[in-house]
Amino acid sequence: MTGDAHDVRESALIVETRGHTALIRINRPAERNSLSVSTLQELDATLSALTLRDDISAIIFTGTGDVFSAGANIRELQTLTPATARIFAERGQQLFQKIADARQLTIAAINGYCIGGGLDLALACDLRIASPDAVFAHPGARLGIITGWGGTQRLPRLIGTARALEMFMTARHVMSAEAHTIGLVNRVSDDVVECALEAARRQIK
């Protein structure tokens, strides 16, 4: 491992640089790597700094343990009013659009559960590489909500309207092999980070 890393005791993210590639690891295992307001703010600041760097050609997002990201923090969602819910949705939309618009190659190295807003994050990336046991879902239908972070637009474009509506309306889990078959992910690999790093190296050459 080369490069520098943030102090994990103070940060929800571990950020490393490996050559011309930045690796952002969501590091909130006790919270299933949920995307709380503070985590979104930290991710936004980190991404903004990285996208300005001429020496960074690719940015990889991954998680810790068996979770890429479980999405928004449900406890925070329960406290939202209509006004604050709009602000929360716009914050996520703007961040994920920043990922989609980044001049660098962006890759989601999906190491496990990729749920709700976590799936929205992956959808904003250029490429998605999943572990064999990765699981994808938009569980909003079971909670009486729908994602507000761009997934309703990006998912149909990627896998088609019918499949996307099924995922949204049934909240069913899609396993890694099916995700690859329907085009939700580009590749399945036992080592998603190394596979993503190799994809980044090929793009840089």
Image (spheres, rainbow, N blue to C red):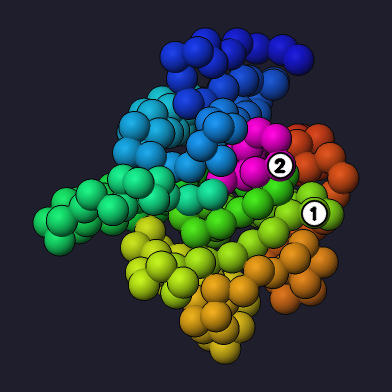
In the rendered view, tell whether residue 110 sits above or below residue 152: above
Task: Residue at 65%, 25% (x, y): give it.
Answer: 20
Q: In this view, which residue lies farthest toward the bottom?
A: 162
| Picture quadrant where residue 151 is located | bottom left
Quarter holding the N terminus is top right
Nearest the eye: 137 or 122 = 137
Which mark is drawn over residue 66? 2
Looking at the rendered structure, the kind of residue marked 2 is Asp
Q: Position of residue 187 (x, y in %)?
A: 79, 57
Does the magenta-highlighted stretch encompass residue 66? yes
Q: Position of residue 52 (x, y in %)?
A: 42, 28
Which secondary structure lies at badge 2?
loop
Does the magenta-highlighted stretch encompass residue 196? no
| Picture quadrant where residue 184 is located | bottom right
In the rendered view, tell whether residue 102 sits above or below residue 114: above
Which mark is drawn over residue 133? 1
Q: Which residues are magenta?
A: 60-69
Nearest the eye: 52 or 147 = 147
Disc 2 crowd rating (10 Å Cα; few below 14, some 14-19, many 20+) is some
